[in-house]
Amino acid sequence: MIYQIIPLEMGSLVERHVFQKDNKEIKCGVVWKLGSVITATKPKFMKNYKPAVGICLKDISGASISTTYDGEKVIYFSETIDEEERNELSDIFYETSRKYSGSYGNVFHDMGWQEVDVGAFLFGELDVREVQAESESYK
């Protein structure tokens, strides 16, 4: 049996990467308007789940992002990053830089940034459904 976890609010499924360098930090990733998560293990987290806090997919046994729609890239900076560096890093992240090419993760790494965390998260109210196979999952 496959279990599908569906956020009931738009923007409640996110993937986040955290990069650090010296006393600076970048949090960036994708927020999906709609999407779902699947797992072959019956979710047991719901009785203790707090919608305002959410849950990391790593904490759901066997969970993976199944379906996503209309992703929006977002980036946030610590206050220790000045405006000029923010602009350069944003251009790299949004792939508008004329100076750098390639994935933002590789470029950040080449610039001395270390990826210290990566994860996917669910927030808000959730619906858990039992489906026969992944092909029957909600879209």
Image (cartoon, grey):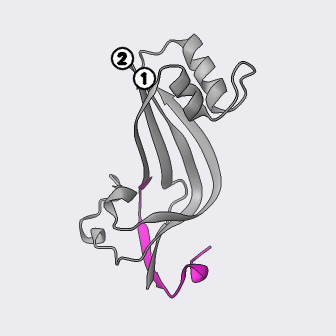
- Which one is nearer the viewer's eye here, 30 or 52? 30
Which residue type does callout 2 highlight? Answer: Asn
Residue at image point 55% right, 23% down: 110
| Label 2, residues with CA under 10 Å away: few <14, some 14-19, many ≥20 | few
In the rendered image, residue 48, in percent from the top left (x then y), is placed at 24, 65
Residues rendered magenta in the picture: 121-139
Residue 78 numbered tag: 1
Looking at the image, residue 1 sits to the left or right of residue 11; the answer is: left
Quadrant of the image for the N terminus? bottom left
Contact (CB < 8 A) between labels 1 and 2?
yes
Quadrant of the image for the C terminus? bottom right
Sequence-earlier tag: 1 or 2: 2
| Label 1, residues with CA under 10 Å away: few <14, some 14-19, many ≥20 | few
Q: Is residue 19 above or below residue 80?
A: below
Q: Is residue 81 visible?
A: yes
| Foreground label between 1 and 2 | 2
C-alpha gap between disc 1 and disc 2: 9 Å
In the rendered image, residue 69, in percent from the top left (x then y), is placed at 64, 59
Q: Which residue matches tag 2?
A: 23
Which residue type does callout 1 highlight? Answer: Ser
- Which one is nearer the viewer's eye here, 75 or 127? 75
Q: Secondary structure at mark 1?
A: loop
Q: Is residue 3 above or below residue 6?
A: below
Q: Is residue 133 above or below residue 90?
A: below
Q: Secondary structure at mark 2?
A: loop
Residue at image point 42% right, 66% down: 63
Looking at the image, residue 126 sits to the left or right of residue 134; the answer is: left
Q: How many marks?
A: 2
- Which one is nearer the viewer's eye here, 64 or 78? 64
* Residue 75 occupies quadrant: top right
